[in-house]
């Protein structure tokens, strides 16, 4: 996937595991929910664009996980693992330094390391 394809729409996908009663014989297959994030109207390579894109990814993750940012967990900055995983994987896949910086500012460097999120940019020189 090239950069132009990534920038048209970003899909935040989550896997929601259904609750299984204790003693069930087999686990049901997980379901995947995808929410598209519009990015064509912003420049995610700027600091402000990275912050705005991060906010959109986070809102999409809450929607895909069936959660709300107004839930007590989210208010106390302790998002559920579904939202945390969806945001972390989406940011890591895009590899946009300004988006990574927004993620690190919100979640901390240690959490970013869990998902392999870094702001390192390689520069080719002659």
Image (cartoon, rainbow, N blue to C red):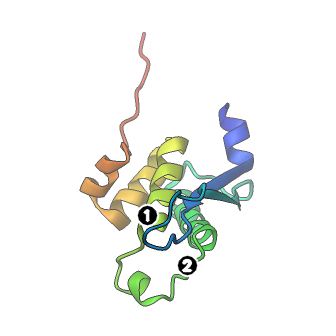
Q: Position of residue 99 (x, y in %)?
A: 48, 53
Residue at image coords 41%, 59%:
103
Q: Residue at x 61, y 55 (%)?
A: 13
Which residue is more in the foreground, 62 or 19?
Answer: 19
From the viewer's side, name the closer residue of 126 and 32. Answer: 32
Compare marks 2 and 1 and give the one earlier in the sequence.
2
Q: Are marks 2 and 1 in contact (CB under 8 Å)?
A: no
In the picture, the quarter occupied by the N terminus is top right
Image quadrant in which you'd find residue 85: bottom left
In this rendered view, identify the residue nearer to me: 109 or 51: 109
The image position of residue 87, as x and y in percent, is 49, 59
Q: How many marks?
A: 2
- Residue linked to disc 2: 67
Residue 5 on image: x %, y %: 73, 38
Q: Secondary structure at mark 1?
A: helix
Q: Is residue 53 above or below residue 118?
A: below
The vertical placement of 19 against 74, above or below, is above
Q: Is residue 4 visible?
A: yes
Q: Quadrant of residue 75?
A: bottom left
Whether residue 96 is visible? no
Residue 10's tag is none
As helix, strand or loop, the secondary structure at mark 2 comes to loop
Q: Which residue is mark 1?
A: 84
Q: Is residue 41 left or right of residue 74?
A: right
Looking at the image, residue 35 sits to the left or right of residue 119; the answer is right
Which image quarter holds the C terminus?
Answer: top left
Above or below for 120 versus 39: above
């Amino acid at each position: 996937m090239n950069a132009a394809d990534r920038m048209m729409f970003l899909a935040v996908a989550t896997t929601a595991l259904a609750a299984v009663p204790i003693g069930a014989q087999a686990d049901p297959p997980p379901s995947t929910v995808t929410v598209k994030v519009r990015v064509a109207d912003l420049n995610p390579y700027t600091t402000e664009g990275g912050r705005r894109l991060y906010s959109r990814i986070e809102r999409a993750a809450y929607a895909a996980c069936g959660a709300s940012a107004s839930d007590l967990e989210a208010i106390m900055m302790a998002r559920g693992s579904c939202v945390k995983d969806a945001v972390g994987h989406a940011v890591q896949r895009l590899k946009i330094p300004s988006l990574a910086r927004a993620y690190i500012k919100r979640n901390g460097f240690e959490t970013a390391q869990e998902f392999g999120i870094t702001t390192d940019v390689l520069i080719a020189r002659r």
